[in-house]
């Protein structure tokens, strides 16, 4: 798989590691800061590889390497959509870091154009590949929960001033959003996916409590109503002292209850079902070791995308999944802005519509 990476910042190491794990042919890397490319390549023992081209302009990279089969985008969030659309226009399959875009218009255009042109797009919601998440999804698809009553996601993390000083675009409405868009969108993706997907309304409150040097929120809570009548809550914050506490997902059904915990939904804390089966013993207490909050899912997501390209099928986490997670975050923002519940589908709203909120 001939591969290139655009954006060599904090998360890029997970992308290069995933490409190497899947034996991709790394054709090129791209970043506007040359030192970041070299630091990334050196970290993975690739600094001396003259076969990996370096670019400051991704458009030049796309033009000079028509052989590319897959590009991943790991730039500032506000640049994701424009780069993705250029890749789609060039006929190159793409993995887009979360969030897929910062506006519904851009997200919908990525979905539309990729489908029209037959280009594969995967939103990088890698936590879907966590062992705990996969076990829970299998139980859900097997009907073990019965009819769902409600669910919730809680992302209780810490992001201090040093984190934002590393990259001044963080916490801005144009390039990042706040804790719900940056830290919580993976959990929101899991919640919507597990609860059945079709959200019909969102009511929310967000605040900026401890990060007055940012434009965006550092805590938010929301109530989601689904088409089948079930409800769910979202609680997300970057205000937890002194370090990341947890990312927990709860699902409550008429015949099953599950709680996924750990710092990134990588553990199973509760596993109770009416139809107790062989293998259930020991599920509560399952822990998938991870070296950081990003988990182990990048390599599995990359493997799935490569297989999807070769098999001419949709990826496990497609563009619509990225669009749907973004829709919930933007609906939360709009509800805060208007003080009212927001009906979905959501159209014509962007993170920049929140400018001046705090």
Image (spheres, rainbow, N blue to C red):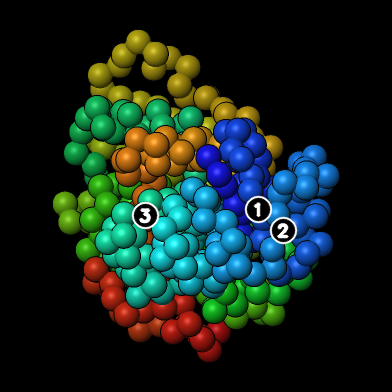
Residue 54's mark?
A: 2
Q: Is residue 322 left or right of residue 266?
A: left
Is the residue 260 above or below the residue 60 in the image? above
N-terminal of the pair, mark 3 or mark 2, is: 2
Residue 28's mark?
A: 1
- The answer, for residue 345, to whether it is visible in the render is yes
CA distance separating discs 2 and 1: 6 Å
- The percent position of residue 358, horizontal first and vertical second, equals 55, 84
- Label 3 belongs to which residue? 119
Residue under the point 59% across and 61% down: 64
Decide: marks 3, 2 in contact (CB < 8 A)? no
What is the quadrant of residue 294 in the picture? Answer: top right
- The percent position of residue 99, horizontal first and vertical second, equals 48, 62
Residue under the point 54% across and 79% down: 174
Decide: marks 3, 1 in contact (CB < 8 A)? no
Is the residue 312 above or below the residue 111 in the image? above
Q: Dot 2: few (<14), some (14–19), or many (≥20) neighbours within 10 Å?
A: some
Is the residue 149 above or below the residue 269 in the image? below
Q: Is residue 312 left or right of residue 176?
A: left
What is the quadrant of residue 291 in the picture? Answer: top right
Q: Dot 3: few (<14), some (14–19), or many (≥20) neighbours within 10 Å?
A: some
What is the quadrant of residue 194 in the picture? Answer: top left
Residue under the point 65% across and 74% down: 169
- The percent position of residue 303, horizontal first and vertical second, equals 49, 35
- The answer, for residue 183, to whether it is visible in the render is no
CA distance separating discs 3 and 1: 20 Å
SS state under label 2: strand
Front residue of this view, candidates 10 and 8 = 8
Decide: marks 2, 1 in contact (CB < 8 A)? yes
């Amino acid at each position: 798989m001939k591969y290139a990476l655009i954006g060599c910042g904090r998360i890029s190491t997970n992308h290069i590691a995933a490409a190497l794990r899947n034996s991709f042919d790394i054709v090129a890397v791209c970043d506007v800061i040359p030192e970041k490319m070299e630091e990334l390549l050196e970290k993975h023992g690739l600094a001396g590889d003259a076969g990996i081209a370096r670019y400051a302009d991704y458009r030049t990279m796309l033009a000079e390497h028509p052989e590319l089969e897959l590009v991943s985008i790991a730039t500032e969030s506000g640049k994701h959509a424009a780069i993705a659309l250029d890749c789609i226009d060039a006929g190159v399959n793409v993995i887009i870091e979360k969030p897929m875009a910062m506006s519904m218009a851009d997200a919908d255009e990525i979905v539309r154009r990729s489908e029209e042109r037959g280009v594969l797009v995967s939103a990088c919601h890698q936590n879907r590949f966590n062992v705990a998440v996969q076990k829970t999804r299998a139980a859900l698809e097997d009907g073990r929960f019965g009819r769902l009553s409600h669910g919730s996601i809680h992302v209780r993390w810490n992001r201090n001033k040093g984190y934002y000083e590393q990259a001044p675009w963080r916490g801005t409405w144009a390039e990042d959003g706040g804790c719900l868009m940056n830290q919580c969108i993976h959990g929101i993706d899991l919640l919507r996916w597990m609860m059945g997907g079709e959200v019909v309304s969102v009511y929310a409150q967000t605040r900026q409590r401890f990060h007055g040097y940012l434009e965006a929120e550092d805590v938010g809570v929301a109530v989601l109503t689904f088409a089948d009548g079930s409800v769910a809550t979202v609680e997300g914050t970057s205000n937890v002292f002194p370090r990341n506490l947890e990312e927990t997902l709860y699902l409550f059904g008429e015949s099953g209850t599950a709680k996924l915990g750990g710092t990134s939904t990588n553990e199973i804390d509760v596993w109770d079902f009416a139809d107790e089966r062989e293998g259930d013993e020991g599920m509560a207490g399952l822990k998938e070791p991870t070296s950081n909050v990003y988990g182990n899912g990048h390599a599995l997501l990359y493997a799935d995308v490569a297989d999807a390209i070769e098999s001419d099928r949709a990826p496990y986490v497609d563009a619509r999944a990225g669009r749907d997670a973004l829709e919930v975050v933007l609906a939360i923002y709009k509800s805060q802005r208007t003080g009212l519940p927001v009906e979905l589908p959501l159209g014509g709203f962007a993170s920049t519509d929140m400018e001046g909120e705090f």
